[in-house]
Image: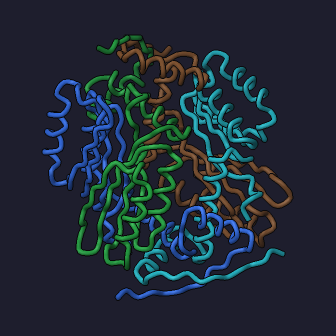
Chain colours: A brown, B cyan, C green, D blue
Amino acid sequence: MEKLKRFGVSMNLELLRKFDDFIKKHKYKNRSEAIRDMIREKFVEEEWEKDRNVAGCIVIVYEHDVREIVDKIIDIQHKFSRNIISTQHIHMDKENCMEIVAVKGKVEKIKELYFYLKALKGVKYSAITKATTGKRIE
Amino acid sequence: MEKLKRFGVSMNLELLRKFDDFIKKHKYKNRSEAIRDMIREKFVEEEWEKDRNVAGCIVIVYEHDVREIVDKIIDIQHKFSRNIISTQHIHMDKENCMEIVAVKGKVEKIKELYFYLKALKGVKYSAITKATTGKRIE
Amino acid sequence: MEKLKRFGVSMNLELLRKFDDFIKKHKYKNRSEAIRDMIREKFVEEEWEKDRNVAGCIVIVYEHDVREIVDKIIDIQHKFSRNIISTQHIHMDKENCMEIVAVKGKVEKIKELYFYLKALKGVKYSAITKATTGKRIE
Amino acid sequence: MEKLKRFGVSMNLELLRKFDDFIKKHKYKNRSEAIRDMIREKFVEEEWEKDRNVAGCIVIVYEHDVREIVDKIIDIQHKFSRNIISTQHIHMDKENCMEIVAVKGKVEKIKELYFYLKALKGVKYSAITKATTGKRIE
């Protein structure tokens, strides 16, 4: 079992009241949960800055009837098969697809994959979501 | 077929040279592709600011052995079934899971779902990726 | 005098150790200071999202010898005199100037001023810094 | 005189129409100006990622009557005198001050200065604005 530690935080009354409103709005159960969440957010930012082993996803929105786009996407993904965990494909409407690629590995490598997908003709939009393997964040 | 228009852009030589380096690094086929991409990025930002119908995904990383966390995640997702397209689940290691929830709908609603998932005890990290349905972005 | 309140936060040992490293790196005196800072950051983000009365600054970098640019900057600033507190001008080198405009008021108005300055021919770069009047953040 | 080059960009009609709306809203004179601006934004992001010589500003909002805060701010600023170009001070209200510190130099050094100021007791909020010396961005 993991060891819990408890420590005290001081805050003036007015800031604390606003913090409690924030907690309510953001559905946190208690102050500790909210504080732990803010701390872990800072760590994930740092993991990505330092080219650590990270996890996350790449989202692309594209028109499937652009010539050869599906083949090109598959080709690129195969070249980065070590960094791709799995893929989720959504038919948004008659023309548009959204594909969410779960990725892991070194930041540099993931960014390279992202650039390749982003630059394809027919890819209208792309984004990268920074997350974490969870390993260094208890 | 969609109608293509062509227009001229002027730029001093040095900026253009750097832009061409940027294009190469980012794997774009040509300047038009890179410019269209930058323009569409601005539009997706605006869609999210204006509470339009958007699409995207929510990523959560959590420890699956925290009491009742899996049940709670399912409960929340069912309440937002209209906004959830599909879910992709990844076993990162013995303790950590990553779940990627493809979402669509109004920005406000998606953020509410995000807050509920983010606030759960056992969810170590969460992030929201802003993307687009592709509809208003040709 | 302001009233201080103290409350307990629980965290597992490993997260706490990493938090203490973070505190050291970021020069915080103690955990409370770091936690208060993270909380206030969230509030300032919300102030800007909700079009509250805010404060901040607009930075522009421009080439002073572009035709009429200095006149145009002054014209625009006069139109927004209610939102401009003061201006700091730096001669970066023979060609480039940096001007930092301290601003306050409604978010919408500040963004409008920002767009006007950003769009000027000769302005190479511009950025807006979100800060706060400090009033709602104790 | 600097050498201007002109090149063609192709875009489908609908995207172009939306781009023209964007240009109007953002007060740009013409498409070239808007496109050059988007390109230069990408370059400044990269300058900051690569620890180049940059310029920008640090904004702090603080309560001036917190014990010794003014002395501490001055001490820190003196230690970083090489990176500080000038300082602009604004009395926001009876309690709150905003100070805008124009900075230049290596990214790492500027961040260190930022951390020191940010961590001070009495500093309620702080932000860093990434800008550029303008040198590598024509």
Q: Identify the residue shown where x is 49% and y is 33%.
A: A135
Left or right side of A63 for A33? left
Name the residue nearer the viewer: B22 or A9.
A9
Residue B91, image quadrant: top right
Residue A67 located left or right of residue C124 = right
The answer to which of A46 and D28 lies nearer the viewer is D28
In this view of the protein, which residue sits in the foreground, C60 or C42?
A: C60
The correct choice, above or below, for D86 with respect to A8 in the image is below
Choose top left, top right, bottom left or bottom right for residue B87.
top right
Point out residue A100 in the picture as x, y percentages from the top left corner.
Answer: 69, 49
Q: Who's the residue at 44% across and 58% down the image? A: C79
Residue C120, by quadrant, is: bottom left
In x, y percent, where is residue A73?
A: 70, 63
Q: Residue at x 26, y 31 (%)?
A: D120
Between D72 and A120, the one nearer to me in the picture: D72
Measured from the top left, where is residue B2 in percent x and y? 80, 74
